Image: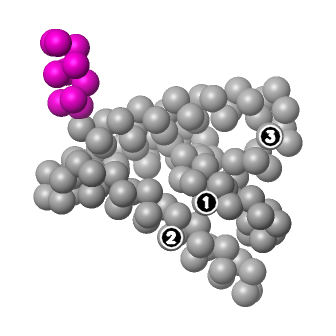
Amino acid sequence: MLAANFIRNITITSWIVTANVLLFILFYLLTSINPSFIDNIALKPAELLNGKIWLLVTSIFMHGGIGHLFMNMFSLVFIGKFLERIIGRKRFFWFYIISGVAAGLIYSVLAIAF
């Protein structure tokens, strides 16, 4: 009961930060073992055109290194917790995911166009 209340009280921002850190470690290990694994998680517009639409989601959790991860999570903690309090837990989660997918789509369209 106490553990369930504790888990329920953790902010979505904290869950997203935790997911980003754990996925960064997992992706790092998997690409260390097999460098071509990155083709299945990093957003490359040509791969997106080949039908790998999941890249729009996996790329949200990709980071170029520990410094990139740290700066993104540092920003997310401050901005995310504030925004989560304003719009709510569920809306913030969907805002995070939809914003990431939209950013990936915009990047891909611009990369293909130019």
* Pair 3/1: label in front: 1
- Check the image and report above or below for 2 versus 63: above
| Earlier residue among tags 3 and 1 | 3
Secondary structure category for the residue under label 3: helix
Q: Which residue is mark 1?
A: 56
Disc 3 to disc 1, C-alpha distance: 16 Å
Provide the residue span drawn in magenta. Answer: 1-10
Q: Which residue is mark 3?
A: 37
**Quadrant of image for the N terminus:** top left
- Residue 72 or residue 7, whichever sits in front: 7
Q: 60 left or right of 40? A: left
Q: Amino acid at mark 3?
A: Phe
Q: 10 left or right of 99? A: left
**Quadrant of image for the C terminus:** bottom right
User: Could you say which disc has been placed on residue 102 in the image?
Assistant: 2
Q: Amino acid at mark 2?
A: Ala
Q: Residue at x 74, y 30 (%)?
A: 30
| Earlier residue among tags 2 and 3 | 3
Secondary structure category for the residue under label 2: helix
Q: Residue at x 21, y 29 (%)?
A: 8
Label 1 close to label 2 by CB (< 8 Å)? no
Q: Amino acid at mark 1?
A: Leu
Q: Position of residue 90 (x, y in %)?
A: 27, 51
Q: 49 left or right of 92? A: right
| Earlier residue among tags 1 and 2 | 1
Give the crowd class for mark 3: few <14, some 14-19, many >=20 residues within 10 Å. some
Visible residue check, residue 79: no
